[in-house]
Image (spheres, rainbow, N blue to C red):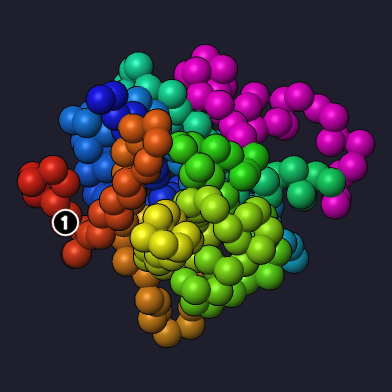
Amino acid sequence: MTIKTTVILPDIQYPYCDNLMLQKILKVVNSAQPDAVLSIGDAIDFPQVSRWSVGTAGAYAPTLQKHIDGFRKDVLVELRDAAPNADITWLEGNHDLRIRDFVGKYAPPLRTLRALDVKELFGLEDLNISYELGPLRVGTNTYAIHGHECGTYVSTPHAWDQKFMKRYGSEKNFVFGHTHQPFITTRATGYGGKVSPWFTMNVGSIMDPTEAKYIKDGSVNWQMSFAVLRDDGKRVWPELVLANNRSFFYNGTKF
């Protein structure tokens, strides 16, 4: 039996990620040599062009190119070096499209410039990394989505599960990011003993919570995490790897 393994990177939000967790996940990728690696979205933050920065000092910070160069060097190049033979995909999140949104709102004539396209900004072709929109099929009846694709925010695992089922259909598995709150919730369909299980999994994030300045008291209900899918062509088995104080076990090894 051939098993396809996919490592799913959570919301990274570079440069506000926890670098130790990032390096440990890259070590897992190098050790596992998966068939595929998927970044679930919000890989880079782009705070300079956030709507929250308009009219503030952050909009004038001379750091945009530094963040772009740093993300390519510290994340994308390192990821390709760790998994030279893997299919690597970056799924678009709401933070990843901030440049496009900013240009569309404040400088519409620049929208057609290829140089401002994410693929060009990060040299993705040279790294053989694809940039895709969700929902993206990532396994047997399994689809990756960044949560912003479904519009309004909801607060519970069951609500996210219901939202995806209503939009995309019930006989599917869903993997997503966006809320930084990792979980797996399950359901099943069928009768007469012939029951098929399904899951919805939030991959979480590795954003450093001390960088979440918009949370006034620094209290967050996030847990750092990442995920793995194993697919035999008929079924998919999800594994959500949760970190405790930036340490976790994978395949019996502590990282």
161 and 109: which is toward the camera: 161
Left or right, 142 with respect to 4, comes to right
Looking at the image, can residue 112 be seen? yes
Residue at screen point 37% across, 22% down: 86
Looking at the image, can residue 71 be seen? no
Q: From the top left corner, tell me how far across and down residue 6 is, in percent.
A: 36, 35
What residue span does the magenta drawing correspond to? 105-132
| Quadrant in the picture for residue 243 | bottom left
Q: Of helix, strand and loop, which mostly describes the magenta segment?
A: helix
| Quadrant in the picture for residue 52 | bottom right
**Identity, as a three-letter code, of the amino acid under mark 1:** Ser
Residue 127 in magenta stretch: yes
Residue at screen point 66% across, 63% down: 166
Residue 69 in magenta stretch: no
Q: From the top left corner, tell me how far across and down residue 95 is, in percent.
A: 60, 52
Q: From the top left corner, tell me how far across and down residue 63 is, in percent.
A: 56, 45
Residue at screen point 47% across, 60% down: 190
Instruction: Residue lying at the far bottom in this picture: please name it.
Output: 217
Residue at screen point 56% across, 17% down: 125
178 and 100: which is toward the camera: 178
| Mark 1 crowdedness (10 Å alpha carbons): few <14, some 14-19, many ≥20 | some
Quadrant of the image containing the N terminus: top left
Depicted 245 relative to depicted 43: above or below: below
Mark 1 secondary-structure assignment: loop
User: For mark 1, what is the residue?
Assistant: 247
